[in-house]
Structure formats: C-alpha cells, structure tokens
Image: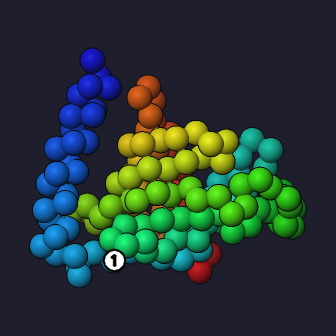
Amino acid sequence: MIPVLRLLAVIIGLSSATFAFAEGEAAVEVPRGLWETEPDASGVILHVRTRRCGRALCGRVERAKNRQGYDTPSNAVGDKVLWEMRPQPDGSFFGEYRGPKANRYLQSRIEVVGRELRLQACDDESCAARTWIRIR
C-alpha cells in the first residue's frame, strides 16, 4: 500500500511542479558543477559532472578514483547517472538516478545545501540517501 501512496504523492508533486516551473523558470538555478560521490564498498569514488539538459538537470561520471586518490579504471566512467531531474518549487530537483551498478531509481530527489548535493534515491521498495561534495 505504501508504494501506491508514494507514487500518488509523486504524481501530484510533478503536476504542481510543472506549473510552478513554467511560471518561474528563471528563478530556478541548476546546480552545475563537478561533484564527488561517497566511496562505494570497494572504496571507489566517482566524479560526476552536472549540467543543464533542456529544462532539466543531468549528470555524467567523468572519472573514478581509488582509496589512495588515484585514477582507477571503471565501467562507470562515461555513464549518465542523473536523468531528467526536473526543478521543483522548493529548489530541489526530481527525476531518475541510475546507480553505478545500473540500479534504476525512478523516484529520486536532489537538493543542494552549501557545498553538498543531497541525493535521495527511491525505488518501489526502499530509499537510499547519498551526499556528494562539490569539487568545482
């Protein structure tokens, strides 16, 4: 029952957000830049570049670093991880996040607070919170 309620809240939020964005598009600032993810289970940190894509925000992995801070090979480099993140009236963005293991989280939200990008990625059963730090 909870996933149905969550989906209903998302639909209502998206419809009202579309109207608010159309009225005040110039007031929404897209958090463009380079962000460092939290380390994964093997200690790999990704650098994600965010930029405007149409009226939304998108993000792509630019590089991967190992525990010592050196570049390391990764299949994630070049992958798009933020898809069609649409601005919301509260300044956050709502859309799709795809994790490094190709997990799709269709109900994802990001919000920038200072030098942090706070990502909440949700699927039908659970949510995960991540914090990325601005590099540039």
Q: For the residue carrying disc 1, how many other residues have a C-alpha within 10 Å: few (<14), some (14-19), or many (20+)? A: few
Task: Check the image and name the residue furthest to the top.
Answer: 1
Q: Residue at image x 48%, y 74%?
A: 51
Relative placement, left or right, of 42 versus 15 is right
Relative placement, left or right, of 56 versus 82 is left
Residue 42 placed where, x, y %? 80, 44
Q: Residue at image x 65%, y 58%?
A: 79
Q: Between residues 6 and 81, which one lies in front from this camera angle?
A: 81
- Does 42 sit above or below residue 5? below
Relative placement, left or right, of 78 versus 22 is right
- Does 72 sit above or below residue 103? below
Task: Check the image and name the residue furthest to the front.
Answer: 54
Q: Residue at image x 75%, y 41%?
A: 41
Which residue lies under the disc numbered 1?
A: 29
The reply to whether residue 120 is visible in this rendering is: no
Q: Between residues 1 and 38, which one lies in front from this camera angle?
A: 1
- Does 22 sit above or below residue 27? above
When asked about the image quadrant of residue 46, the answer is bottom right
Q: Residue at image x 43%, y 74%?
A: 52
Residue 70 placed where, x, y %? 86, 67
Residue 47 placed where, x, y %? 67, 66
The reply to whether residue 127 is visible in this rendering is: yes
Q: Quadrant of the N terminus?
A: top left
Relative placement, left or right, of 35 versus 93 is right
Q: How many marks?
A: 1
Q: Secondary structure at mark 1?
A: loop
Q: Amino acid at mark 1?
A: Glu
The colour scheme used to paint the residues is rainbow
